Amino acid sequence: MRKLLQKMIEKLSGPTGPGTDYLEYRIKCGKCGEIVTVKVFPERDLNPTYEDSGPAYVLKKEVMDSKCFRMISVEISYDSSRREIRREISGGTFETELSGKK
């Protein structure tokens, strides 16, 4: 039972360890101006579209800042190599984008 709980915790906590790639987006709230940092793990967070044309993967996120608690809607499309091809945001703006490894 203990091993099962440990495995569940590891799965829910997300990727860790060397070689864990992620994309980091900085989003600025359109109302209060607070910057929210969002980490995207391509192996886990991108949803396949299963369509013949258009993006191969899509990411849809609702982000809330801690100052005015306004919801910011983000939708980013990626090609089959998980490279960004289009981004849309409602309720805020994209600031800088950082790629990295943890």
Image (cartoon, rainbow, N blue to C red):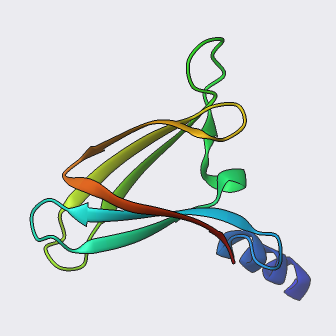
Q: In the image, is residue 69 above or below residue 55?
A: below
Q: Front-most of 76 and 10?
A: 76
Residue 33 lies, in percent from the top left, at 15, 70
Residue 44 lies, in percent from the top left, at 68, 54
The residue sitting at 64% across, 69% down in the picture is 100
The residue sitting at 21% across, 55% down in the picture is 92
Q: In the image, is residue 74 above or below residue 88?
A: below
Residue 61 shown left or right of residue 17 in the figure = left
Location of the C terminus (image quadrant): bottom right
Q: In the image, is residue 9 above or below residue 54?
A: below
Among the 4 quarters of the image, the one containing residue 99 = bottom right
Residue 93 lies, in percent from the top left, at 25, 54
Residue 92 shown left or right of residue 78 in the figure = left
Residue 17 shown left or right of residue 102 in the figure = right
Residue at the limit of the structure toward the bottom, as seen here: 2
Q: Front-most of 29 and 6?
A: 29
Among the 4 quarters of the image, the one containing residue 2 = bottom right
Residue at the limit of the structure toward the left, as seen here: 31
Residue 69 shown left or right of residue 42 in the figure = left
